[in-house]
């Protein structure tokens, strides 16, 4: 009996994982930090094309969970986006 219940729970969790992956429509790419791969230390706030990749269509900063950035570079991206917003290079909100 115990063994049967264990197998049931395992199949449930696997199904849950699949559903989560299907539900996540945001940018899911390889789970590594692009800036660490390129060995970039600073992120330019004038480089809008790069920053736009880390902004949702509503203008929000995409979380590190979705973007795959490390904590250090996520912080720098957030700072750069906020600077760019202040200079009206990026929007505060989506259309
Ligand atoms: Zn990084």
Image (tube, rainbow, N blue to C red):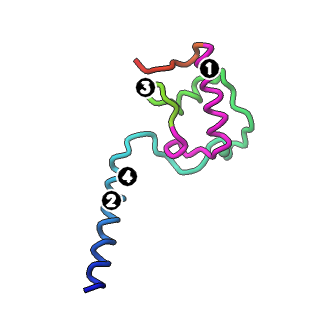
Q: Residue sitting at 27 percent across and 74 percent down?
A: 8
> Which of the 4 image quadrants contains residue 38?
top right
Q: Earlier in the sequence, mark 1 or mark 2?
A: 2
Q: Residue sitting at 51 percent across and 46 percent down?
A: 65
Q: Earlier in the sequence, mark 2 or mark 3?
A: 2
Q: Is residue 47 above or below residue 42?
A: above
Residue extent of the magenta highlight: 63-87
| Circles 1, 2 touching at the beta carbon (< 8 Å) | no
* Label 1 Cα crowd, 10 Å radius (few <14 / some 14-19 / many 20+): many
Q: CA distance from mark 1 to mark 2?
A: 38 Å
Q: Element under label 2? A: helix
Q: Which residue is mark 3?
A: 58
Q: Which residue is mark 1?
A: 84
Q: Element under label 4? A: helix
Observer-side mark, 4 or 2, equals 2
Q: CA distance from mark 1 to mark 4?
A: 32 Å
Q: Which residue is mark 2?
A: 16
Q: Which residue is mark 4?
A: 21
Report the disc number at residue 56: none
* Label 4 Cα crowd, 10 Å radius (few <14 / some 14-19 / many 20+): few
């Amino acid at each position: 009996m115990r063994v049967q219940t264990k197998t049931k729970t395992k199949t449930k969790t696997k199904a849950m994982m699949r559903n989560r992956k299907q539900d996540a429509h945001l940018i899911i790419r390889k789970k590594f930090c692009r800036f660490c791969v390129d060995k970039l230390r600073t992120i330019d706030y004038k480089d809008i094309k790069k920053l736009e990749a880390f902004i949702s269509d509503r203008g929000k900063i995409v979380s590190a969970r979705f973007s795959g950035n490390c904590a250090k570079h996520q912080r720098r991206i957030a700072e750069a986006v906020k600077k760019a917003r202040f200079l009206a290079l990026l929007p505060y909100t989506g259309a």
